[in-house]
Image: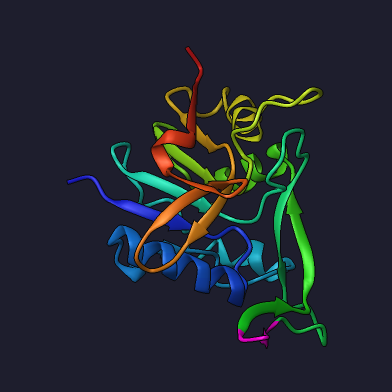
């Protein structure tokens, strides 16, 4: 039976919380939220000797990659803030609204994320990949959609892959996930665009 998984390439407190909200909305068990247990440095590479977190996925499964995007066309990188040394990420409340502060940005280009997915053991015959980063499906004036560029970087190693991006901003609670464009909210599928190698 096919399963859905959430992958956090930047394993921060903020991204863990966001992934749990997505998991709740999509009825994905929290043990199907995947991430390298080490957040940075040499230890992250060394941990892959013990556990490549994507290696257990099967071709029929679905993988949602969770990170921040620019929300606009021509985005070069996606990423998130993480705690590094004394620069610790924390949640604060501003006028009753939660906000994450602190930490340092870790970003990925399509080439860098493709390399990370391969290092984490994504099976070569995997098919259904979603980039849940704001704006990952927008076509720009200078750059093709971020999700399409990721697919192109993985074409030689993952010939069956299809990558879905989204046109707009992710809006998420434990009850629903939708895409916001301006002041309008849309179901995910209405703002999704899927790229294939064919």
**Residues in magenta, as a range:** 90-96
Q: Residue furthest front?
A: 183
Q: Is residue 131 above or below residue 9?
A: above
Any magenta on residue 94? yes
Q: Is residue 45 above or below residue 82?
A: above
Observer able to see residue 171 = yes
Q: Is residue 138 above or below residue 123?
A: above
Question: Could you say which is closer to the camera, residue 187 or residue 194?
Answer: 187
Give the prevailing secondary structure in the magenta stretch.
Answer: strand
Q: Residue furthest left?
A: 1
Q: How is the image coloured?
A: rainbow
Question: Could you say which is closer to the camera, residue 21 or residue 6?
Answer: 21
97 horizontally vs 51: left or right: right
Q: Residue furthest top?
A: 198
In the rendered image, residue 56, in percent from the top left (x then y), is placed at: 36, 52
In the rendered image, residue 154, in percent from the top left (x then y), is placed at: 58, 30
Observer able to see residue 119 = no
Task: Name the residue located 82 percent from the left edge and 83 percent from the top edge.
Answer: 87
Q: Is residue 31 above or below residue 87?
A: above
Task: Name the residue located 35 percent from the left edge and 70 percent from the top edge.
Answer: 30
In the rendered image, residue 51, in percent from the top left (x then y), is placed at: 47, 63
In the rendered image, residue 178, in percent from the top left (x then y), is placed at: 45, 51
Question: Could you say which is closer to the camera, residue 150 or residue 27?
Answer: 27
Task: Name the residue located 65 percent from the left edge and 66 percent from the top edge.
Answer: 44
Task: Name the residue located 59 percent from the left edge and 34 percent from the top edge.
Answer: 137
- How many numbered markers are drawn? 0
Any magenta on residue 86? no
């Amino acid at each position: 039976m096919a399963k859905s998984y959430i992958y956090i390439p930047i394993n921060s407190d903020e991204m863990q919380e966001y992934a749990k909200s997505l998991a709740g909305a999509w009825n994905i068990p929290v043990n199907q939220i995947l991430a390298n247990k080490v957040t940075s440095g040499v230890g992250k590479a060394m941990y892959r000797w013990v556990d490549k977190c994507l290696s257990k996925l099967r071709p029929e499964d679905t993988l949602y990659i969770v990170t921040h995007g620019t929300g606009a066309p021509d985005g070069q990188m996606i990423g998130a803030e993480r705690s590094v040394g004394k620069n610790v990420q924390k949640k604060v409340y501003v006028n009753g609204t939660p906000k994450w502060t602190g930490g340092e940005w870790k970003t990925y280009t399509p080439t860098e994320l493709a390399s990370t997915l391969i290092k984490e053991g994504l099976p070569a015959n995997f098919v259904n990949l979603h980039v849940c980063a704001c704006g990952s499906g927008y076509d720009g004036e200078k750059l093709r959609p971020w999700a399409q560029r990721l697919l192109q970087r993985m074409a030689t190693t993952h010939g069956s892959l299809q990558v879905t991006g989204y046109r707009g901003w992710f809006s998420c609670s434990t009850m629903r996930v939708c895409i916001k464009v301006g002041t309008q909210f849309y179901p995910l599928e209405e703002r999704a665009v899927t790229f294939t190698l064919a």
